[in-house]
Image (tube, rainbow, N blue to C red):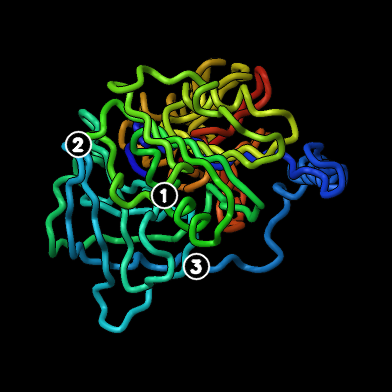
Amino acid sequence: MSDDDRERRVGHHADPRPPTDLFRSGRPDRFMLGLARLAARLEPLTARLGPGHPPPKPTEDLPVRVVRTERPASDVVVLTLAPVAPRTTLPAWQPGHHVDVVLDGGVVRQYSLNGDPSDRSRYRIAVRRIEGGLGSGLAHGLREGDVIGLRGPRNAFPFARAERYLFVAGGIGITPILPMVVAAHAAGLPYRLVYTGRSRSGMPFLDELPSGPDVFVRPDDEYGPPKAADLTRGHEPGTPVYVCGPAPLIAAVGALVPTGTPFYSERFSPPPVLDGRPFEIRLGRSGPVLPVEAHETALDVLLRVRPDTPYSCRQGFCGTCRVGLIEGDPDHRDRPTGGAPRNGGFTPCVSRAGEGERIVLDP
């Protein structure tokens, strides 16, 4: 999927609920629930430990060339990317994966892959233009022949095996959902897709959707604004739900999903701070002390004093904004993709500290 800074309305990486018990349909699996609780208790302890071996050095950006540009909607550009080096095979990916795209000036943004996973000679991404958005503006300015860098792919929206699915996509949220729908259709698995948008003219990839009663295209100008009950009608408890789109859409659908049903979401914007407590950050051992209010993130504060602070996803998985941690006991809330180690770092877009506590950063 796409989009920028605060606008990478590609929002929250997957928020899966516990898988259902194989023998008691619709109920959470007790073993997996226990495993999840154990992992949650161990993570704060293991995060303090150094890696058992030196972490691998980061690989260089993979240079790719824009070989095709398409504009299926007035504010959407679709970019097909191929390796610059001849006879180069792109890394394998699965539905739900995204890549970090390195644009002009080192600006990094995440966009979901939405082409054919079996074709490793090229990738395809789609970017919706956001008014005033730096990343989306740069992406829309690309022309065939331009060279950019890629990192990844990464998996923040996993497509799990299941017997059937419910997919809900809002606008550009169809981007990561499309490969999932195509895969389910090709496998002959029961599924239902509900694709919403303001009008058909602004809904990309309509011509690539499988045909049939399992696909419901629902533009607002034809059906009116959707209600969550319209989007989840016919959903059977236990059927995994995949939803991507604006935060209100995700929240509305999620509220109707029964407890114990797998629920996966990717949002367009940073998750709101719901349980924040005020704390402080110090920049270096002798630098200024900055208060972080309950409703804001440490990254918000850093950007006010250092506007050039790098960041991208604002959701705790890309690692762009991660800084060194000199002192303090942080509440790590990031979820690095690919098992990347924190290595004593702090991710200010989501991580925090206890109420009234102070952590010292090495930004």
Going 26% across and 82% down the picture, which residue do you hit? 86
Residue position for label 2: 75
Q: Write down the quadrant of residue 50 in the picture.
A: bottom right
Residue type highlighted by circle 3: Lys
Whether residue 261 sits left or right of residue 123 in the image: it is: right
Tell me the SS state at disc 3: loop
Q: Nearer the viewer, residue 284 or 140?
A: 140
Say which quadrant the N terminus sits in: top left
Tell me the SS state at disc 1: helix
For label 1, count other residues whose C-alpha is less than 10 Å away and answer few (under 14), some (14-19) or many (20+).
many
Residue position for label 1: 178
Rendered image: mark on residue 57: 3
* Residue at the outermost front position: 213
Residue type highlighted by circle 1: Leu
State the CA–CA distance, disc 3 to disc 2: 38 Å
Give residue 268's position: percent from left, percent from top: 41, 33
For label 3, count other residues whose C-alpha is less than 10 Å away and answer few (under 14), some (14-19) or many (20+).
few
Tell me the SS state at disc 2: loop
Give residue 363's position: percent from left, percent from top: 45, 40
Going 57% across and 51% down the picture, which residue do you hit? 158
Q: Is residue 290 above or below residue 327?
A: above
Of labels 3 and 1, earlier in sequence is 3
